[in-house]
Image: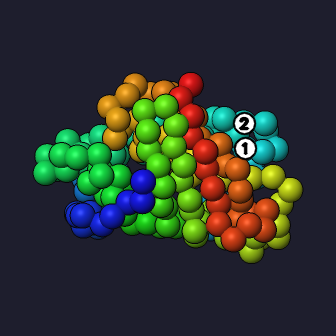
Amino acid sequence: MATVVTNTVKYDHTIDQKTMRHRINGIPSVLHCHHYSSLYTQLALDAGETDLLKDCARDSFRTVLIRYFDRNPDLDTREKKIDVGCQYYALLGLGTLKVLFLGPYSGEVEVPSSHVDEGWKKKWGEYDKPINYITAGFIEALFEVVQERPPRTFLAIEKESIAMGAEKSVFAVTRR
């Protein structure tokens, strides 16, 4: 199922001038450069904690998506939520995301551009395995929230990776 643009994500970015803390749509947000993302991905790899990195991403993005959808009741179809979820991914500076299929038990997502992968390649070159655990967490959160499923219902695995030299990253999603 290719996502068709049906809505434009609402974006309210504020900065507290005293604390310099950013908020996007009322949610505290931190924007990181590709170097920082690459470094904490490398740290997770070195520590053997890639699942922790993905879990943290999923849990954080899940909260953001739930709050956004709750505040925007006009997003009353799966297609609208998928569309806005893909736009939110880009808004957060993570790259571009295309949901090809989102079913109750499986799905497929393409990532034509990835902040994490491109940063990795600029810092260290190509790698011998996928490294985009942050996007995998976002995808799991999106599938769960769109389908109103509990946390940890879906598992996203990167099957093709920009960091490995592929033209785009591809994630297979399965129900746990």
Q: Secondary structure at mark 1?
A: helix
Work out whether 101 lies above or below 2.
Answer: above
Mark 2 crowdedness (10 Å alpha carbons): few <14, some 14-19, many ≥20: some
Residue denoted by label 2: 49
Determine the residue located farthest toward the front in the rendered image.
Answer: 1
Callout 1 touching callout 2 (CB < 8 Å): yes
Compare residues 108 and 165 and report the one nearer the observer. Answer: 108
Inspect this view and state whether residue 68 appears: yes
Determine the residue located farthest toward the bottom in the rendered image.
Answer: 122
Residue denoted by label 1: 44
Q: Secondary structure at mark 2?
A: loop
Work out whether 93 lies above or below 151.
Answer: below
Mark 1 crowdedness (10 Å alpha carbons): few <14, some 14-19, many ≥20: some
Residue 123 located left or right of residue 148: right
Compare residues 25 and 155 and report the one nearer the observer. Answer: 155
User: Residue 145: horizontal and vertical position, in percent?
Assistant: 35, 38
Point 43% across, 66% down: residue: 90
User: Residue 127: horizontal and vertical position, in percent?
Assistant: 83, 60
- Quarter of the picture containing the N terminus is bottom left
Amino acid carrying mark 1 in the image: Ala
Amino acid carrying mark 2 in the image: Glu
Point 70% across, 50% down: residue: 159
Work out whether 89 lies above or below 155.
Answer: below
Point 19% across, 50% down: residue: 75
Inspect this view and state whether residue 22 appears: no
